[in-house]
Image (cartoon, rainbow, N blue to C red):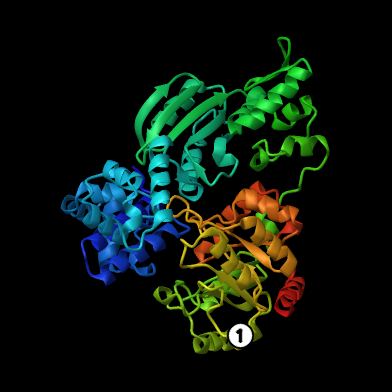
């Protein structure tokens, strides 16, 4: 059984949570969290490194002990130390930790104050309005807990897109080795670039259906075979992810790919358009009577109903059909359109690589500029920069830029937006920077008017350039704070500043809907990695996926501009 980086990271995160609840040494807890992030952000699988006999202690923050634990997880799929810690931890705690927004400290407070025995007790406490009376919680937190509990019982379990990606890519590579296989593609919400996916739908062309199906169910990571036939099969992997297989002939490939990509409402409209033309459209092709005359490609299917091909990311029935009919479909932005990255961290705060290392990594990826935006002083847990330390970093960037010919480092900061809307560093320091990226990292539970006014005030600051991760959400872990995003977008347009599409796999923030609203308002968006390591720069692919779902074209994205044009646009924000 192959073990992926996400599973190793999840084990370390759970270990850190249980240790924190148990009151363990904070440095030990922090070591597990750092190790989890290191493993999760690697561009290579640790299982591959183990197989090659590589020294895992060369990884940032991984000493002999943690290297040994990674080796144990890769070889056994579990960690004995975690099993021991679980046995010492009441089941109630483990259940509560799975509720988004409830970290170890809050879980401990709830159990002690309310004598909780499980999720049903938590729900009763929330319905009885007892949680809001506890210090540090309040009515809004209580409502978020109720919503999270409802979502937990009413929805299927979903994986983040970035977590699902290595599973999908590994399974596809495995199937391609099967004799008789033609094309192999993952369809469904994965192909549409949704933030989370419920399962994987793999479409394969080939005529050796039984042989392909047999190979599919023998995949080493399969935990359970749910169904198997000549051209269909369904399995559940060790991580509980369901994967479904469909084998189709070449002549049906396009129709099947369109059908299994979805979205559901988009497909319904296509079938209606086909019926209006006296046609029948299904996963096997487009038919006039019993004669199939289209279906080998998606393009042929769309053409049969009078439409141009529509990119998968737009297939949600949110206006793409009408745009296609009227010739208004956007030419969506591509990863290769990005010539720079406007949000990256270094070892000066909570990053894991130095200035020069981050510059080299950006250069290797073909970027022409990279903004260094370490945290400001308010974020003490990230070793935030004081004015003095930021000034020293600016001087270092100037020295490095003298030696660079093919990339430029921009002097920036991810400055905290304080509760009153002020920025966390003095104006004379902010004025020396190339860009100021403002971010909310605290007081997430302010009322909607207060949270909105707080951000609007920050955006009015004369040195404000870009609003980072505008909603503050962490997918599956923290709901967005309550803010009037339409007002934020209009303010950006009026002020001439920009919003970020944060590409970090846990954020993907802005949402696709708000990307589309910003585009319609003429607000440029920066698709930025929020990289805390060299490998994180590759997460730009997920940010671009989000941008594409938001209908963004190259011209809608700030960091598709040349360095000279970018500097002009940034200077305009600093002079407004």
Looking at the image, the residue that sits furthest to the right is 326
Quarter residue 537 falls in: bottom right
Quarter residue 69 falls in: bottom left
Residue 78 showing in the rendered view? no
Residue 432 showing in the rendered view? yes
Give above or below for 342 relative to 96: below
User: What residue is rendered at 51% in x and 55% in y?
Assistant: 480
User: What residue is rendered at 40% in x and 63% in y?
Assistant: 38
Position of residue 53 measured from the top left corner of the image (x, y, whole percent): 34, 59
Give above or below for 520 relative to 525: above
Which image quadrant: the C terminus? bottom right
Horizontal side, residue 32 vs residue 321: left or right? left
Position of residue 55 measured from the top left corner of the image (x, y, whole percent): 34, 65
Can you identify the residue that label 1 sits on?
Answer: 427
Looking at the image, the residue that sits furthest to the top is 290
Q: As rendered, which of 119 and 280 lies closer to the eye?
A: 119
Q: As rendered, which of 403 and 574 lies closer to the eye?
A: 574
Position of residue 272 measured from the top left corner of the image (x, y, whole percent): 71, 22
User: What residue is rendered at 60% in x and 41% in y?
Assistant: 192
**Total numbered labels:** 1
């Amino acid at each position: 059984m192959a073990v992926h980086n996400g599973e190793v990271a999840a084990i370390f995160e759970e270990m850190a949570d249980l240790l924190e609840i148990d009151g363990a040494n904070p440095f030990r807890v922090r070591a597990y969290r750092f190790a989890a992030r290191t493993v999760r952000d690697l561009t290579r699988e640790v299982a591959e490194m183990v197989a090659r006999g590589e020294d895992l202690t060369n990884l940032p923050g991984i000493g002999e002990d943690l290297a040994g634990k990674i080796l144990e997880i890769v070889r056994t799929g579990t960690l004995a130390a975690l099993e021991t810690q679980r046995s010492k931890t009441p089941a109630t705690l483990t259940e509560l930790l799975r509720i988004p927004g409830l970290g170890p400290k809050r879980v401990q407070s709830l159990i002690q104050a309310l004598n909780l025995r499980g999720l049903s007790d938590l729900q009763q406490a929330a319905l009885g309005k007892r949680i809001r009376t506890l210090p540090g919680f309040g009515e809004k937190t209580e409502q978020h807990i109720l919503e999270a509990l409802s979502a937990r019982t009413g929805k299927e379990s979903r994986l983040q897109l970035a977590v699902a990606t290595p599973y999908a890519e590994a399974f596809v590579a495995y199937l391609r080795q099967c004799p008789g296989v033609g094309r192999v593609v993952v369809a469904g919400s994965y192909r549409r670039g949704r933030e989370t996916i419920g399962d994987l739908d793999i479409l394969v062309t080939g005529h050796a259906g039984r042989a392909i199906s047999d190979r599919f169910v023998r995949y080493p990571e399969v935990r359970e075979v749910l169904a198997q036939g000549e051209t269909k099969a369904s399995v559940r992997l060790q991580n509980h992810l369901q994967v479904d297989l469909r084998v189709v002939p070449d002549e049906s490939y396009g129709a099947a790919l369109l059908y299994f990509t979805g979205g559901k409402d988009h497909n319904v409209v296509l079938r209606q358009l086909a019926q209006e033309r006296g046609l029948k459209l299904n996963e096997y092709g487009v038919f006039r009577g019993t004669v199939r005359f289209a279906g080998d490609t998606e393009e042929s299917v769309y053409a049969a109903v009078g439409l141009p091909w529509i990119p998968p990311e737009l297939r949600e029935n949110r206006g793409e059909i009408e745009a296609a009919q009227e010739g208004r479909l956007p030419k969506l932005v591509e990863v290769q359109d990005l010539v720079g990255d406007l949000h990256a961290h270094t070892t000066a705060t909570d990053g894991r690589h130095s200035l020069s290392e981050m510059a080299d990594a950006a250069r290797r990826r073909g970027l022409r500029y990279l903004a260094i935006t370490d945290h400001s002083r308010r974020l003490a847990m990230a070793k935030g920069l004081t004015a003095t330390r930021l000034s020293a970093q600016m001087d270092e960037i100037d020295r490095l830029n003298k030696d660079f010919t093919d990339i430029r480092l921009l002097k920036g900061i991810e400055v905290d937006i304080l509760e009153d809307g002020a920025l966390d560093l003095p104006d004379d320091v902010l004025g020396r920077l190339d860009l100021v990226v403002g971010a909310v990292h605290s007081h997430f539970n302010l009322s909607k008017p207060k949270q909105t006014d707080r951000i609007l005030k920050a955006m009015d600051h004369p040195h404000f350039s870009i609003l980072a991760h505008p909603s503050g959400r962490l997918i599956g872990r923290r709901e967005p704070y309550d803010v009037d995003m339409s007002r934020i977008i209009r303010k950006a347009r009026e002020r001439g500043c920009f919003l970020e599409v944060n590409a970090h796999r846990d954020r993907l923030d802005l949402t696709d809907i708000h990307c589309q609203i910003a585009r319609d308002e003429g607000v440029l968006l920066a698709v930025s990695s929020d990289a805390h390591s060299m490998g994180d720069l590759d997460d730009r692919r997920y940010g671009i996926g989000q941008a594409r779902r938001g209908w963004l074209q190259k011209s809608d994205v700030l960091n598709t501009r040349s360095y000279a044009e970018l500097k002009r646009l940034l200077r305009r924000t600093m002079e407004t």
